[in-house]
Image: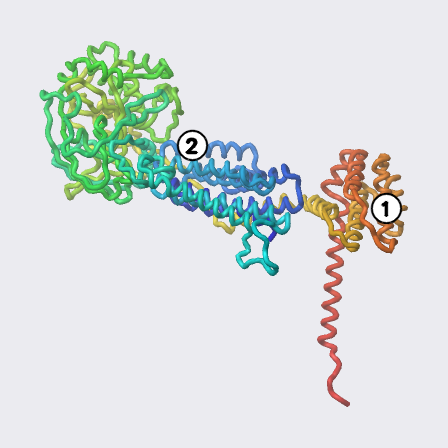
Amino acid sequence: MSGRARLALCAAAATLMTSCALLPLVSPATWIFQAVFLLAVQTGVGALTRRVPLARPLTVAAQALVTLMLLTLVFARHQALAGIVPGPDAFQHFSALLRAGADDVGRYSIPAPLSDGIRLMVVGGVLVIGLAVDAFAVTYRSAAPAGLPLLALYAVAAGLSGGGAAWLWFLLAAAGYLMLLLAEGRDRLSQWGRVFGGAARTPGPPPASGAVAPVRTGRRIGAVALGVALFVPLALPSLDGGLLDSAGRGIGNGTGVGGGFSSVNTLVALQDSLKADEDRTVMTYRTTASDTQGLYLRIGSMDDFDGTRWKSTERRTVAVPATFPAPVGLSGEVKRATVRTRIEAADGYVQNWLPMPYPASEVDISGNWRYEPVGRTLIGDHGQNTSGARYEVSSLMVEPTAQQLAGAPEPSPAMKREYTKVPRSLPAVVARTAREVTAGSANHYEQAVKLQDYFAVSGDFRYNTDVHVGTGSTAIASFLKKKEGFCVHFSFAMASMARTLGIPARVAVGFTPGTPQADGWTAVGLRDAHAWPELYFEGVGWTRFEPTPSRGSAPSYTQTNTPGTVESAAPKPTVSASAEPSAEPSASESCSAQLRKLASCPGQSSAVIGPQDDDWPWTRILGLTLTGLLVLGVPLLPLLWRMRVRAVRLGGHGRTEADVAAYTLGVWSEVTDTAWDHGIAPEGSQTPRKAAERIVRLGKLDPEASDAVHRLATAVEQVLYAPRPRPVASLANDARLVAKSFRASASRPARLRALLAPRSAVRVMWRISAVRTTLRTRLSARRRALFHRPSSQNG
């Protein structure tokens, strides 16, 4: 194997080893096999084009073109010409997949499911990085800058993952890069011959180890660098996890006590859960509460609104106290009851925040958990999560009356300053709509109820999990215009509008109460995932509201003696949506406004996931890939053959007399073939000098090219007739000068014909015919020898 081929393999291996850092981000990890196959094809194309050889930019362009065709075959074959040639429809499909992938990244938790959009992002990203690494390290022979795209790939993966095995992915990526550097160093050293270094060697063969001094030094430097990166942070308590664990979990001597936490985005999996094909149970619980309709299992809250998104403020955590402090703002006049809930999380439910009824007053759980006092939440520390957790929670069932909420005094200035902030980028329509909806309200409570009724009852909003209202500061305004979305949109919009009215607000995330079972337990499934607004009222504290139609249940304190509403019965449990198509009217058509407010309508089904193409078998993909390469490659074979032959003829040569003769005759053959490609067929009966005169005359070459042809003819005669052939300098330059003159004097069609369909390519057919004749002659001779052996008997 040549040094450049070995370097190309090392470049592909380094890309794949670094790509392993993406494995924890997506499940299942079968995309890596697809990436391996496509990267192998990309590397093979690079090796072939460099062997031709093509110019360096053309090599990179050829690899990029083949990469695009491969991605088209895998992801947009139905929109492409012949399933592999991308057109406008294919590029539109790519754009749609990338948008869907970006949305999936924003709403799925890690590991995210392997949707088509995410698969295109990871596989396409690996191929782009692989192309950059191959171009730097192999095509342009500079392996050091190839570390930049590898670093970018690892940085993205490490920034999103943060898992306990981050050190393993770092080790693989670093090992791949070092392997690439060593391969390039060995290739460079091999071009210089023997390497001298150190003390003089004794006569005899080299040592058995075979590693020269620079290679051994490179290995030592690599080992030291890896040791510093991996092990030094472990000995520094102040780093709390060191280089490999920026999140401070699971690595290093730091305990994490009293440190801040980097909150996970608890909203990322909501839409995925609501649209799940199967409502998988994530936890079950048994409670002493007489009515579970208000027993929401809260995970956490988001109180920082920057105009683009709601997120959790990073706050310091403490050790879990035996008993939690009393809830902020809750006075002794508000009715409450203490309930005890035993919760068992499924083994497959992985969450860093602990689901609990709110407000919890005591938690009995084992493991590494930390308490965040402001949000009254428990966060896993050093990799702790909810998988298989068994715990008991004591919590308060707070039951304020409408009168208590209506008579609540103004919150403290600190509370209003922190929880009523809205950014300047918030569209004016949000505050204007809030004022219009709550016009005539006497207090914040009436405003809150009118906001809830506007979304859940009177505003004609529809619940739909398959809606896209955009991102950024205009998302809420878009939702208010389209009037369609799911719980995240409703809770975000109501909390934002409440803040514009001066009501402290935040968004809570968790699960609705679930479905009671016959054995006394209650099952909570993926589709019970939910988000709701919490508004603060002095004397009551943080209070739940339910603006999302057909989800959860409206709190009783918003149904009694509220403006514009009528006393009604207790809300009924939400009915699960059937998986079968129904001929009945949709929930939005058959459900009255009052029933929608009471959550007594049948739940609307999750957005239907469109049919997706089944994964093609690898044999079919391979067959189509080879077919596409043949369709595009066969017309280019004459061009590639001529480029290869020209490179061999005009390349380097040895210094012996035989090498000089072969090289000179090869350059002359290149000149005669160039003339042939431009319409001047060779005549074997002419001497080199006569042939040169004919080429100059018919080709109408300029004086400089004419002199070059005659110099070449003289060199050929010297090789053919001189006793001892002598090497002549600049033969290759003379041949290139002749070719340049032919191209300058030829018309554009003639130039294209000479480039794409060179006449001299017929030599391939002559060679094939000669080989066939030789083989046929040999087979005939062996057949005669086999069947016509002379007799060995004596007469």
**Residue 552 image position (x, y, % from top left):** 23, 30
- Identify the disc placed on residue 102: 2
Rendered location of residue 722, percent (x, y): 87, 53
> For this view, does 582 lie left or right of residue 218?
left
Which is nearer the eye, 202 or 606? 202
Instruction: Give the quarter of the image for residue 525.
Output: top left
Residue type beneath disc 2 = Ala
Q: How many marks?
A: 2
Residue 177 percent coordinates (x, y):
49, 43
Please, what secondary structure does the residue beneath circle 2 have? Answer: helix
In the rendered structure, the answer to whether residue 340 lies left or right of residue 753 reads left
Q: Secondary structure at mark 1?
A: helix
Query: Which kind of residue does numbered mark 1 sit on?
Result: Ala
Q: Taking the image as drawn, is residue 572 in sight?
A: no
| Residue located 83% across and 43% down the image | 680
The color scheme shown is: rainbow
Mark 1 is surrounded, within 10 Å at the Cα level, by few (under 14), some (14 to 19) or many (20 or more) other residues, namely many
The spot of residue 52 in percent (x, y) is 67, 46
Quarter of the figure that contains the C terminus: bottom right
The quadrant in which residue 337 appears is top left
Q: Classify 222 as above or below 427.
A: below
Kindly indicate the quadrant of the structure image that contains residue 565.
Answer: top left
Residue 470 visible to an observer of this rendering:
yes
For residue 713, the mark is: 1
Left or right, 198 with respect to 530, comes to: right
Mark 1, mark 2: which one is toward the viewer? 1
